[in-house]
Image (cartoon, rainbow, N blue to C red):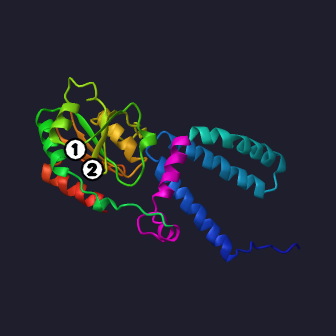
Amino acid sequence: MTPILFISVRWLDAIDILLVAFLIYQLYNIVKGTVAIRIFVGIFALYLFWKIVEALKMELLSDILGQFIGVGVIALIIVFQQEIRRFLLYLGNTQLVEENSFLRRLFGWTRKASSEINLNLNEILEAGKDLSKEKTGALIVLQKNTIIDAFLSGGTKIDGEITQGLLLSIFNKLSPLHDGAVLIENNRLVSAGNVLPVSQRTDIPKNFGMRHRAALGLSENSDSLIIIVSEETGNLSLVHKEEISEDLSLSKLSTLIKEKLGS
């Protein structure tokens, strides 16, 4: 009688399984709520089936599936280019490269902390109050650590001081720049009329308009704070890291901005 052979498991195998599980979990977090989740689940099921077939020594079927998956890698890069970019940004925004981290100190990667930026918040809040009262839609982006130039398009350079009057004139309904977003960086109004990437998530509430979707789209790719003034209700909202805080008072909006810029 042939003795039963048990699979030997090394401690490195356990680490390998844990790392793969962690990566799969993070990939799932990135694509959940989007149309890509179905593709992700289908590919994962196909890959798992291929590994089972390979373990069972079904060589013909294993070769066919292996060739299919090998050729499909290029197609996956095209299909998941947005998700791959988000995953790489996620890695870049982890504790490994954050402010005062070991790698930054080791290689001398330093920059001014967000909490040290003297943001002229009062002017922004006063403009937000007037825009909310008049139900004038607006998007105001407060850039934090992530450089977001690659995610913006169609903007007009302003490079001006942040004032209530300037913001109100930009978002005036007769202004050619009122439909886009204003970008604020290092306490300067850098540009206006910027087009933001629109989120492809499928779980966004139906009452959210294009401004909310654009704010979510940018928050998926950066750590920027995005202030929204609803054109329909005049409500103030704040978006940060894919989370929306809705129907905020001026004091609550001010508190949230200060907390998140200092976090």
Callout 2: SS? loop
Residue 190 shown left or right of residue 41 in the figure? left
Which residue appears at 82% of the width and 55% of the height? 57
Callout 1: SS? loop
Q: Which mark is residue 187?
A: 2
Residue 163 position, x and y percent, is 18, 42
Q: Which mark is residue 197?
A: none
In the rendered view, tell whether residue 21 sits above or below residue 213.
below
Q: Amino acid at mark 2?
A: Asn
In the rendered view, tell whether residue 169 sits above or below residue 226.
above
Whether residue 224 appears in this view of the structure is: yes
Whether residue 171 appears in this view of the structure is: no
Badge 2: few (under 14), some or many (20 or more) residues near its Cα, within 10 Å?
some
Q: Amino acid at mark 1?
A: Ile
Badge 1: few (under 14), some or many (20 or more) residues near its Cα, within 10 Å?
some
The N terminus: image quadrant: bottom right
Residue 170 position, x and y percent, is 23, 32
Q: Main secondary structure of the magenta part?
A: helix
Q: Nearer the viewer, residue 61 or 114?
A: 114
Q: Nearer the viewer, residue 207 or 172?
A: 172
Magenta-drawn segment: 81-107
Residue 65 position, x and y percent, is 75, 45
Residue 86 on the magenta span: yes
- CB atoms at circles 2 and 1 under 8 Å apart? yes
The C terminus: image quadrant: bottom left
Residue annotated with mark 1: 162
Which residue appears at 55% of the width and 41% of the height? 81
Which residue appears at 70% of the width and 76% of the height? 10
